[in-house]
Image (spheres, coloured by chain):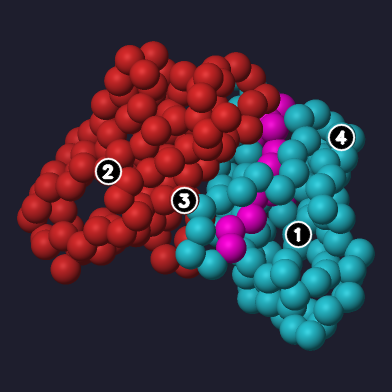
Amino acid sequence: GNSVTQMEGPVTLSEEAFLTINCTYTATGYPSLFWYVQYPGEGLQLLLKATKADDKGSNKGFEATYRKETTSFHLEKGSVQVSDSAVYFCALSPRRGYQKVTFGTGTKLQVIP
Amino acid sequence: ETGVTQSPTHLIKTRGQQVTLRCSSQSGHNTVSWYQQALGQGPQFIFQYYREEENGRGNFPPRFSGLQFPNYSSELNVNALELDDSALYLCASYPNGANTEAFFGQGTRLTVV
């Protein structure tokens, strides 16, 4: 079956530091890939997505590139802010059939001033 | 365009009781999925409804059941509650089709005591 593995947290960074959160996946076919963010006490918000190999998703300074050869979708940001503190989930869904989303376990990011 | 709304936001139930959670999907979305997110974990797929029919189910026992109504709103019912059912329950909606991302509600926090 499909699965997503992401680096364990928590990750603690100083403001303006560079962020990388690693994510690899196992899936049949060519899934769509997503990063979702969850702020404390809230639901999930889509951060960015990519639907085919070599696509780069980007939003709010975050980027991730769909790497089919390494089955990876690492999240990066050049300069984090305190307001980026949240839990980040890597996820995938099949491009055909019903839209079950498979999530990783989440990586908590804490940015300190 | 309204987003996905869930009710109630918080709920406390006693072991053995039954609970019903509600979800109003985003306007124009005919597919609804439910997820269970235990503390510190990623969301786990429970089931999905498309046009009032269940068309996908995760690894959850039959005491987890659901409904979708003609206006595409949905309910999640859990019978014979167990302590391990304590979690954040998330509803997601999307228009049917490939490569469409899920739009999540804020969730219902269920505590079973």
Q: Colour of chain A?
A: cyan
Same-chain check, marks 3 and 1: no
Badge 4 is on which residue? A55
Image coordinates for residue A102, horizontal then vertical, percent:
55, 42
**Callout 2: helix, strand or loop?**
strand
1 or 4: tag closer to the N-terminus = 1
A60 to the left or right of B86: right
Residue under label 2, please give it. Answer: B21
- Where residue A55 sits, quadrant-wise, is top right
Identify which residue is drawn at 35% across, 55% down: B9
**Dot 2: chain letter:** B
Q: Nearer the viewer, mark 2 or mark 4?
A: 2
Give the amino acid at mark 1: Asn
* Mark linked to residue A22: 1
Q: Secondary structure at mark 3?
A: loop
- CA gap between label 2 and label 1 equals 34 Å
Report the magenta residues as a range. Answer: A24-39
